[in-house]
Structure formats: structure tokens, C-alpha cells
Image (tube, rainbow, N blue to C red):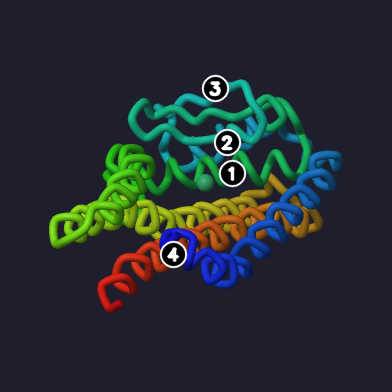
């Protein structure tokens, strides 16, 4: 069947991104397993690190809370709350310091109206719908013959394409949050220089997962576009 005709091609095109993703995830797990067991020389908890970084930047109004789940750490720009998972909140490990400062980095982006963060926040509701509705509309459009079917498929492609835009915009947001975290940690005295290697290792590994996700999203969209426009040529 036509839909599966390009499947071998899809595998071929998406395999490098998939392998990069798996490699990055293994790297994150490795770095996290290692540095979540090493107490930072200063010994502050993740919650303390975040609190100090926020206060040092005049963000006393942002609360730091504990949240359930693994790797669920995030900053909520709507509620102005920084939520840290249990393993980050109360741990005084090097990994916890890195993750907490990274999340505080997102709060700093919010404070300075960092443009990629604004685009990303604006895209969230549309992407949530587009990521599941887009593929459905696309496939229905492909199955319907004629101009209407093609137009419908194009609508689905654009809707689903927003997930790729989202993944691309996420890249500068995440890299910048880690850059802010490293810059502050290494100059504030909250983490000693000897522990920065561990912080860098955890944050850089995490950055690769976002690179892989962006490449995966782009290859998926390219494959969809190939299915649509490849058919029109035949
Ligand atoms: Zn982040």
C-alpha cells in the first residue's frame, strides 16, 4: 500500500536521529547516575541553589516547590513557580545543583522576556492539539483522492509541522537556560570550580536530547511532505 511504500525510506532517514536520541538518553542517564551520587563540595540542596539564584536576580517573588515524579523539574511561567522533583529539591548532589540552576535559568528567561521562550509558550496549546490531530487529518487527506484530499493533507501537514517548529524553538530555550545556569553557578560560589565538570556533564548531556528531538521532528515532517508531494508527481 502507498502509505507503507515510503516506510523503508523513512527508517533510513530517521535512523541517525533515532540513534542520536538513544545515545543522548544513555548519556543523560550515565551523567545523572554518576553525579546524583556525588555531594557538591558546598553541599547546598537543589532547592537552596534555585532560591539563591532567583534571589540574586531579584526574583524573590518566584516560589520554589517540590513536585512528584522523576525528572519532572520545570518552571511554570504562568504561575511563577519553580517546581523541582524530589531528587532535585532535597538532594545536595552536583546533579541537583545543575538541574535546579537550569530551571532557575528558565525563570530568568521569563524575567528578561527572552524571545524564544515567548514563542515556545505561545505555541504550546496549538502544538498539543496539532500533534495528534495533524497526523489524522493528514492521513484522511491522503486517502481521499483529488484536490480536496491534497489540500486537507496539507492542512494536516502544517498542523503537525508545528511540532517540529516547537522542537526547534525549544533548542535555544534549553541551551540558554543551561548557559545561564553554568554562568551563575561558576561565579556565585554556590558550586566550586572542581564540581563544575559534573554540572557541565549533566547539562550538556541533556542538551543533546533536545538536539536529537529537533532532528527527529524535522525528519518526520520531511517524510510526511515526501508522502504528500511524492504522490502528486506520480
Ligand atoms: Zn529546561
Residue 34's x, y, as percent? 84, 47
Say what secondary structure mark 2 lies in: helix
Q: Which mark is residue 101?
A: 1
Q: Which quadrant: the C terminus?
A: bottom left
Residue that label 4 marks: 218
Crowd class of label 4 (few under 14; some 14 to 19; many from 20; radius 10 Å): many
Q: Earlier in the sequence, mark 3 or mark 4?
A: 3
The answer to whether the residues at label 1 and label 2 have Cβ atoms under 8 Å apart is yes
Which numbered disc flags the more N-terminal residue, 1 or 4? 1
- Distance in Å between CA atoms under marks 4 and 2: 34 Å
**Mark before the other along the chain sequence, 2 or 3:** 2
Badge 1 residue CB within 8 Å of ligand 1 = no
Q: Are marks 1 and 4 in contact (CB under 8 Å)?
A: no
- At x 17% / y 58%, what residue is drawn? 151
Q: Can you see residue 155?
A: yes
Percent across and percent down for residue 41 are 82, 44
Q: Is residue 156 left or right of residue 195?
A: left
Q: Position of residue 5 (x, y in %)?
A: 48, 66
Amino acid at each position: 500500500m502507498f502509505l507503507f511504500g515510503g516506510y523503508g525510506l523513512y527508517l533510513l532517514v530517521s535512523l541517525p536521529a533515532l540513534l542520536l536520541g538513544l545515545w543522548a538518553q544513555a548519556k543523560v542517564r550515565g551523567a545523572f547516575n554518576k553525579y546524583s551520587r556525588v555531594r557538591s563540595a558546598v553541599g547546598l540542596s537543589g532547592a537552596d541553589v534555585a532560591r539563591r539564584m532567583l534571589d540574586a536576580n531579584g526574583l524573590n517573588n518566584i516560589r520554589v516547590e517540590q513536585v512528584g515524579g522523576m525528572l519532572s523539574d520545570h518552571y511554570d511561567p504562568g504561575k511563577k513557580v519553580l517546581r523541582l522533583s524530589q531528587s532535585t529539591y532535597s538532594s545536595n548532589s552536583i546533579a541537583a545543583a545543575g538541574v535546579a540552576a537550569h530551571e532557575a535559568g528558565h525563570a530568568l528567561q521569563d524575567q528578561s522576556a527572552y524571545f524564544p521562550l515567548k514563542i515556545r509558550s505561545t505555541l504550546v496549546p496549538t502544538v498539543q492539539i496539532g500533534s495528534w490531530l495533524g497526523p489524522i487529518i493528514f492521513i484522511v487527506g491522503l486517502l481521499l483522492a483529488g484536490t480536496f484530499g491534497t489540500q486537507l493533507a496539507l492542512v494536516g501537514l502544517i498542523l503537525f509541522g508545528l511540532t517540529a517548529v516547537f522542537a526547534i524553538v525549544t533548542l535555544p530555550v534549553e541551551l540558554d537556560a543551561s548557559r545561564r545556569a553554568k554562568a551563575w553557578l561558576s561565579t556565585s560560589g554556590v558550586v566550586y570550580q572542581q564540581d563544575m565538570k559534573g554540572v557541565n556533564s549533566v547539562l550538556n548531556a541533556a542538551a543533546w536530547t533536545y538536539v536529537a528531538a529537533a532532528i527527529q521532528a524535522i525528519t518526520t515532517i520531511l517524510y510526511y511532505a515526501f508522502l504528500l508531494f511524492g504522490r502528486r508527481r506520480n
